[in-house]
Amino acid sequence: MARSNCPQAPGSNSISLGFWTVAMTIPDDPWMQLHSTIDPLRAHALGIVSVWWNHCERIHLRIFSQVLGIDREKGWIVGHDIGDVSLSEKINEALHLSQFDREWRLIITNYLACYDRCRQNRNVLSHFVAVLTDESNGELAAAGFIRVKGIKGTTTVIPSSIDSLRRVAGEIHLFALYSWNLHKALDALRQGRRQELLKTFPIPELLVKPPPQTHPKPTRPPRSSRASRKARKSSPV
């Protein structure tokens, strides 16, 4: 967003962002003041999410190649424009055809579950807008996160505390390292070298949990009347 043309006192940490006038709780850096809509601690956590998730996606494509039993270059050609979910489904379907034994297939299954959880958390933190309420007094550290999704424009409030963001960022960082270790182990196994079985990775908790699904009770068929039952009994057919 562009800086307002209203005059600013030298060294001022206040900036106008259209309909917001915010108190800047960030270092006295003109570029940061111009481009920040949230505080620097949470912005840094979001950056960690983005940087490490890029590593996760790249390693995911390598594991796709290993499970399919093709080299990295061919795997890139086949999988580079396939979405994450489809890529994971193909890995899962190809597992029973792979050279890996049951124990390693279970490790890869766990990896896929963790990848999907991290993917969902990353997506939530990539598609939101920061909002300030009247009670926030213009403090960027008080800005909340919301996501508007779907044709109905359904609004979801996203957990936005520094602890929540760092939890997701830390999990994605550790998962990227785990994914690399899995990739290297699978590479060694394909070359016929024995590898110590990796431990499973703890499945991360969703940042935004889906609403509970309500299943409508099935409608009971209308009961026939006593007269109609009597008529059926007396029918010759």
Image: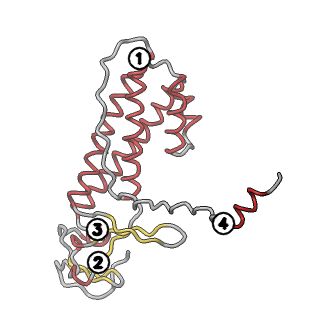
**Side (left or right) of 101 relative to 90:** left
The mark nearer the N terminus, 2 or 4, is 2
Q: Are marks 3 and 1 in contact (CB under 8 Å)?
A: no
x and y percentages locating residue 82 in the rendered image: 56, 43
The amino acid type found where label 1 is placed reads Leu
Between marks 2 and 3 in the image, the one whose residue lies nearer the viewer:
2
Q: Is residue 171 above or below residue 100?
A: below
Disc 2 residue type?
Answer: Leu
Task: Give the number of marks.
Answer: 4
Seen from this angle, which residue lies furthest front? 234
User: Do tag 2 and tag 3 residues touch (Cβ < 8 Å)?
Assistant: no
| Display coloring | secondary structure
Rendered location of residue 57, percent (x, y) = 43, 42
For the residue pair 102 and 226, the one nearer the viewer reads as 226
Q: Secondary structure at mark 4?
A: helix
Residue linked to disc 2: 132
Quote the CA–CA distance across marks 2 and 3: 21 Å
Q: Report which residue position mark 1 lands on.
A: 189
Pointer 3: what residue?
A: 31
The residue under the point 36% across, 69% down is 146
Q: CA distance from mark 3 to mark 1?
A: 49 Å
In the displayed structure, 96 sits above or below 232; it is above
Residue 107, position in %: x, y? Answer: 37, 28
Name the residue tied to disc 4.
226
Using the image, determine if residue 196 lies above or below residue 51: above
**Label 2 to label 4: alpha-carbon separation:** 66 Å
